[in-house]
Amino acid sequence: MKMMYDITMSVSAQTAPFPGDTPFSLEWVWTMEMGGSCNVSRIVMSPHVGTHGDSPYHYGSEGGKTEEVPLDVYVGEALVLDVPRDIGPLITREFVEAQLKNTAGTPARVLFKTDSYPDPAVFNTDFTAIAPEAVHFLAGLGVRLIGIDTPSVDPADSKTLDAHGVFLTRGVYILENLRLQDVPAGRYELIALPMKIEGSCAAPVRAILRSL
């Protein structure tokens, strides 16, 4: 029997957005208690709240928007790598090379489990991000999607978004705010399809991993 892991962050009014971004809110338009024929809610949120896939348009005006992303990138074999808490602020190329040295081939999707953003209700700026050189290295191995359990692949205070820039130039896609704390390192099948929101810079995903 295959194991399944839900690696999606639950979203509520308590979920902290990136500073300055639009938080999640939900209100009821109709309720059966108020005499409505059904319960209908309305939600307002940034597409970057919770687990989401960035579209290239988010970090490059020439990049594709959400409805243009190739769906096969978000479905298929993925490798989850443990990142120690004492690694420092960035996942370096040297760390990735060492982790993959004895790996029999690298799948097209790599997910980093840093455990550096444990509480979604508190925006913690001290999370682990990805060095641009590590993105270049993985792209050279044929990796098409990189995911991380933090709000951004760049440091919280970055103004230049150097890692995002490498994702754009190398054609690699991004998943952010994954929940990997219960997932052992190893290989899985990833299913993390973005909602088809036309013209958007990102979209929420319901991400799962299944054992191979």
Image (cartoon, rainbow, N blue to C red):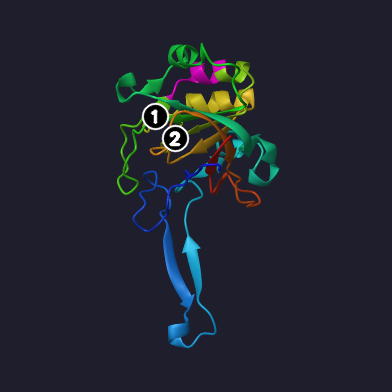
108 or 155, which lies in front? 108
Q: Amino acid at mark 1?
A: Pro
Q: Main secondary structure of the magenta part?
A: helix
**Disc assigned to residue 168:** none
At mark 2, the secondary structure is loop
Identify whether 44 is placed above or below 19: below
Are the residues at dot 1 and dot 2 in contact (C-beta closer than 8 Å)?
Answer: yes
Which quadrant of the rendered structure holds the N terminus? Answer: top right
Asked if residue 68 can be seen in this view, the reply is yes
- Residue at mark 2: 152
Q: Nearer the viewer, residue 62 or 95?
A: 95
| Residues shaded magenta | 130-137
Q: Which residue is mark 1?
A: 155
**Where on the picture, by quarter, is residue 11?**
bottom left
Q: Is residue 44 above or below residue 99?
A: below
Horizontal and vertical percent position of residue 15: 37, 52
Name the kind of residue labelled 2 in the image. Ser
Residue 197 position within the rendered picture, expressed as x and y whole percent measured from the top left: 63, 52
